[in-house]
Amino acid sequence: MQDFIERWKGVFGRVAAIPLVFMGVGVYRAWLATFFRYDAFPTIGVFDYFLFEGAIGIVCFALAFAARKVVPLWSNRVIGRAAAVAMVGGSALVVAACFGMQGDALKWVGLVCAGAGLGALILMWAEFYGSLNPLRVALYHAMAIIFGEALKWLFVGMDAAYLAFFAIVLPLVSLACVKASMRRLPSHDLPQKAKQGASYSFPWKPILLMSVCTFAGGFGTLPAQPLVTGNLVGAIFVCALVFFGVLSASKWFNFDTIYQLAFPLFIIGFLFVTPSFGANPEIMAMCYDAGYTMLSMFIMIVLSSITYRFGISAVWISGIERGIRYIVELLGWGLLAVLSSHAGEQTTSVIYTGVVIVMVVIFTAILFTERGLSARWGIAVSGDPFSESDGPSSPQLALRVAMLSHAHDLSPREEEVLQLLARRESMAEIEKDLFVAHGTIKAHISHIYRKLGVHSRDELHALLEGTDETV
């Protein structure tokens, strides 16, 4: 018992040392809620949410296709200043349009500007997460969402004047947080400008999963619904599950756990909860937010892992994913709005069932072809964007680790340790990265050596740098 207490004291001691600036994702999530979730801003409706999210999607696409010219995005002064001006200025215009100079045109301009700035900010945070190992991504993202949900809860019942103040200030806070977060990373982990000589196929499988579920989510609910307790409970529950699962180092939890829980939660919500509890907004909100939060967290981890392992631009890959996500969400909402106005309840129910069936089929098909975080997810790499001196971080080495892990039946935890060993990190660095005790890492390394048939770091690196035939 004493060992258990001491271990968790050490774990939470390391967690307590995590800088608060890493929670900046929660800040912009709370900022979103100020306009659309509290009914505090008069005249803002569903169409305005479409406009706002459409602007986010368009900017994400634009930055993705301009990635070679604008990355690293977080240190791009032009993009940073433009994002700050767009979010703060846009928020100010919305506030003025709702409480002062009444007019839809002013409000629409403000929402487009705010959404455009947010698109750039989201991709800056994607760069940050793409610079971390997946375990840290899971932990930090879960903590940030919990922080954001707590802020949302504080906003409930707040006077509109205060919400207007936070609507203008919070974008600057999140922008300052992402820049401060990047500066805390080692220089060798910071995103670099794209290098010539590599060609990648797009990792379409996680994008397809997210797109189908986002479309279904948009079709199953309309935007701008008031924030209820169920929203907060659902999101916090799954984030707490990930948070304690990551820190527990238990065999029951790994990244596949998130994968295996996200889609069933989402699908069960659509198949059983929505039809059965359609009149209970609390239960519907709780199940929807639990499933969608877990799903979006898993996609964030997968895309960040691809960036981390292969060196692919986070702005490129996340920009396309976010752009597609917002567009299909709008399509889902639009279809529901059209059917609600022009089709009968029976027709809408049939289409709803068809959407759920398509979602289940795609999830099942991908589940059996891409098992685990280290899967390729539809990506293929040709060429090498790294020089020989950068060998330990090369995409080929990341693929080599995945192949060896699969061939020798390494557990997800052991594969994560092997990825860090391949990057030539020390024992102390691995302990810090994975939030585990010294003895746990030693045990993982011992199991890895035994399964791979090696006896030292030198033999391990020789195997990692060998040819495919040795697997």
Image (cartoon, rainbow, N blue to C red):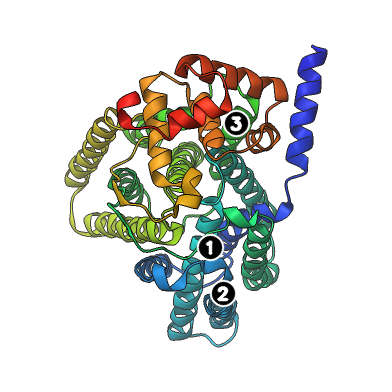
> In the displayed structure, does residue 370 sit left or right of residue 421?
left
Estimate the x, y position of residue 223 in percent, counting from the top left. Answer: 42, 57
Q: Which residue occupies 44% across, 67% down?
A: 45
The kind of residue on which mark 1 rests is Met
Q: Which mark is residue 189?
A: none
Where residue 265 appears, x then y in whole percent? 42, 32
Instruction: Say whether disc 1 or disc 2 marks the residue closer to the N-terminus.
Output: 2
Dot 2 crowding, Cα within 10 Å, few <14, some 14–19, many 20+:
many
Disc number at residue 80? 2
Chain-order first, disc 3 or disc 2: 2
Question: Disc 3 to disc 2, how far (Cα)?
Answer: 33 Å
Q: Nearer the viewer, residue 377 or 297?
A: 377
Q: Establish if 314 lies above or below 115.
A: above
3D distance between C-alphas at marks 1 and 2: 9 Å
Q: Which residue is mark 1?
A: 124
377 lies above or below 54: above
Secondary structure found at label 3: helix
Could you say whether the residue bearing mark 1 is in a helix, strand or loop?
A: helix
User: Label 1 crowding class (10 Å Cα cut-off): few <14, some 14-19, many 20+?
Assistant: many
Q: Are marks 1 and 2 in contact (CB under 8 Å)?
A: yes
Residue type of the residue flagged with mark 3? Val
The quadrant in which residue 39 appears is: bottom right
Q: Give the structural element (helix, strand or loop) at label 2.
A: helix
